[in-house]
């Protein structure tokens, strides 16, 4: 059997790493990189640190508006899929690469398998929400990370092909934590254990308008806490375009993007996390790190229901208050599986 796996952005590289290892025990995998994230610190470093095989095809699409980027991906993916003729197409998450891959495969009558099916924020202004809803309605195999995701699909009338497998990021986190803990990045940066907040900000709703980005940066500075902030290239461009450098105080440490293991090393020793990333919300939860989410909603409702994630939005005062005072009040459950999601996905996709 031949399976084409489509990736394009940092979160997808992380999710693909454990699945690819299991898949290649059972089938021929063709790895296709759309080029959505093309900066070395956002792409190549993840392939190297996670041991992901080099892509068989790199489409080199790059950044751009949603329509242009998705359209170019769709055109190029169609050509590659016609050439490779896979038996299945595997897509991950909720990016434009996910949507383009699902559309290209469905139009060619190739069954689509969606890893992280059933996630919903119920905010249709988010491009990610539109991508995952459409992908789920095109998919033949829907691999859900949580029971809540299964329920969301059922509410939309999707019952066939739905599988509760667990979370593939949990698989990788469990196997990577001991290696990450030995990385020297925290001591190299002169950081004390639990003496800093680890921050990530990259979503369109957070950075493409001046007001929310200014509020986030000001809250970081006004909190008086040490904020360790690996900056997405898009976010760095917006800080410059909007003239917001003045809001970045001396205790807000802007870093270049870091690889998965270095990021995990920083996470393990952080006092809190501040993020608008769905993946980082989960990673904080996995390791019991209090999380302040810079959004009004989350698709990972389990992290909020269990009391480990606070939705602070993008209002300066609420973010600052949460950074200073939020402490978990609940106990963590087993919402994300047992660390064998990747194995189950490979078995289901290949029928072995």
Image (cartoon, rainbow, N blue to C red):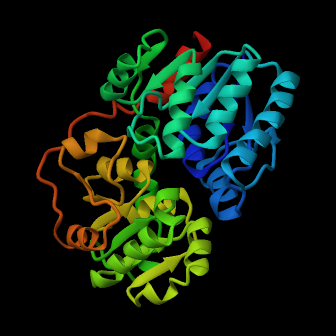
Observer-nearest of 306 and 134: 134
Residue at figure coordinates x 36%, y 16% from the top left:
154
Residue 66 vertical position relative to residue 325 in the rendered view, above or below:
above
Q: Residue at x 86, y 29 (%)?
A: 79
Can you tell which quarter of the image residue 248 is in?
bottom left
| Residue closer to the observer: 104 or 231 | 104
- Residue situated in front as seen by the camera: 107 or 92: 107
Using the image, determine if residue 51 lies above or below residue 310: above
Residue 66 percent across, percent down from the top left: 66, 48
The quarter of the image holding the C terminus is top right
Residue 295 sits in quarter: bottom left
Q: Position of residue 330 (x, y in %)?
A: 12, 47
Give how far across and how far down residue 12 sits, in percent: 58, 43
The residue located at (44%, 48%) in the rendering is 279
**Residue furthest to the left:** 329
Task: Work out whether 165 lies above or below 248.
Answer: above
Tell me if 152 is positioned left or right of 62 in this view: left
Q: Is residue 51 above or below residue 272?
A: above
Residue 159, horizontal then vertical, whole percent: 42, 11
Q: Nearer the viewer, residue 35 or 214?
A: 214
Task: Say left or right for 58 vs 284.
Answer: right
> Image point 62% across, 49% down: which residue?
9
- Of the 4 image quadrants, the one containing the N terminus is top right
Q: Is residue 28 visible?
A: no
Asked if one can make out residue 198 in the rendered structure from this viewpoint, the answer is yes
């Amino acid at each position: 059997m031949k399976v084409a796996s489509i990736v394009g952005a940092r979160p997808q590289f992380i999710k693909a790493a454990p699945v690819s290892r299991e898949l290649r025990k059972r089938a021929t995998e063709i790895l296709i990189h759309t080029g959505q994230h093309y900066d070395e610190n956002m792409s190549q470093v993840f392939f190297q640190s996670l041991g992901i095989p080099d892509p068989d095809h790199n489409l080199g699409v790059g950044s751009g508006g949603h329509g242009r980027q998705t359209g170019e991906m769709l055109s190029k993916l169609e050509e590659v899929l016609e050439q490779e003729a896979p038996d299945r197409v595997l897509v991950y998450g909720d990016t434009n690469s996910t949507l383009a891959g699902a559309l290209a495969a469905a139009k060619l009558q190739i069954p689509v398998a969606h890893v992280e099916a059933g996630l919903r924020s119920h905010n249709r202004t988010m491009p990610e929400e539109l991508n995952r809803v459409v992908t789920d309605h095109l998919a033949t195999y829907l691999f859900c990370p949580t029971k809540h995701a299964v329920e969301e699909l059922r509410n939309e009338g999707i019952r066939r092909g739905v599988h509760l497998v667990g979370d593939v990021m949990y698989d990788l986190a469990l196997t990577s934590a001991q290696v990450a803990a030995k990385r020297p990045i925290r001591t190299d940066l002169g950081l004390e254990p639990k003496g800093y907040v680890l921050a990530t900000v990259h979503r369109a709703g957070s950075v493409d308008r001046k007001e929310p980005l200014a509020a986030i940066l000001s809250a970081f500075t006004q909190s008086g806490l040490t904020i360790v902030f690996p900056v997405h290239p898009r976010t760095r461009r917006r800080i410059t375009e909007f003239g917001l450098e003045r809001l970045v105080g001396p205790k807000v440490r802007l870093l270049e993007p870091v690889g998965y293991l270095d990021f995990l090393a920083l996470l393990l020793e952080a006092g809190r996390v501040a993020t608008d990333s769905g993946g980082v919300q989960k990673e904080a939860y996995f390791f019991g790190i209090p999380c302040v989410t810079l959004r009004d909603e989350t698709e990972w409702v389990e992290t909020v229901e269990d009391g480990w994630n606070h939705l602070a939005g993008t209002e300066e005062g609420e973010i600052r208050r949460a950074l200073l005072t939020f402490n978990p009040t609940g106990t963590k459950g087993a919402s994300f599986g047992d660390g064998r999601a990747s194995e189950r996905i490979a078995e289901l996709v290949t029928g072995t």
